Image (cartoon, rainbow, N blue to C red):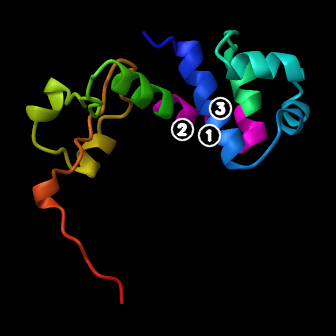
């Protein structure tokens, strides 16, 4: 079983070695002790989110990318498939009332604080691609 800290360490080490950088260079840039960074890379220490952010900044790699890599590595290790997150469509968007003209809204005066404005996302079949000239 792959532990999260091990997968994070492997991802950070891959990023560092791909840049041909030493532990010392990254630890100095991230303001983390060389020994601690080594322990994190080997999966022996749990790094805090602040520490991970500092290491990622020193490596010029977005933390989100490291987390994506870690998720994919862990899914592969467990034989899972990585799926796109499901996007929920609010029920109100499916049953939205007819649009209200702007001048009708202006005549209402103020809108109650608990009023929600729902702007449904365009559907793919209604999008038209226009080539720039």
Q: Which residue is under mark 1?
A: 62
Q: Are marks 2 and 3 in contact (CB under 8 Å)?
A: no
- Is residue 95 toward the left or the right of residue 41 in the image? left
The magenta region covers 56-68
Q: Nearer the viewer, residue 91 or 41?
A: 41
Where does the image place residue 26, in percent across and percent down from the top left? 83, 36
Residue that mark 3 sits on: 12
| 22 vs 66, nearest the viewer | 22
Nearest to the observer: residue 105 or residue 131: 131
* Rendering coords of residue 43 (x, y %): 64, 15
Residue 106: x percent and y percent? 33, 43
**Res 64 quadrant in image:** top right
Residue at disc 1, secondary structure: loop
Q: In percent of the image, x 71 and y 45: which residue is there? A: 60
Which residue is label 2 attached to? Answer: 65
Q: Is residue 96 visible?
A: no
Residue 113 lies left or right of residue 51; in this view the side is left
Residue 28 vs residue 120: left or right? right
């Amino acid at each position: 079983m792959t532990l999260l800290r091990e997968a994070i360490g492997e991802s950070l080490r891959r990023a560092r070695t791909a840049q041909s950088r030493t532990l010392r260079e990254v630890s100095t840039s991230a303001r983390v002790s060389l020994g601690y960074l080594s322990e994190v890379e080997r999966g022996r220490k749990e790094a805090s989110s602040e520490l991970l952010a500092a290491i990622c900044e020193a490596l010029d790699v977005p933390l989100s990318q490291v987390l994506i890599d870690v998720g994919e590595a862990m899914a592969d290790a467990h034989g899972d498939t990585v799926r796109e997150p499901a996007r929920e469509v609010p029920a109100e968007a499916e049953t939205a009332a007819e649009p209200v003209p702007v001048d009708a809204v202006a005549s209402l005066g103020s809108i109650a604080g608990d009023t929600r404005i729902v702007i449904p996302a365009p559907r793919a079949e209604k999008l038209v691609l226009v080539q720039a000239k």
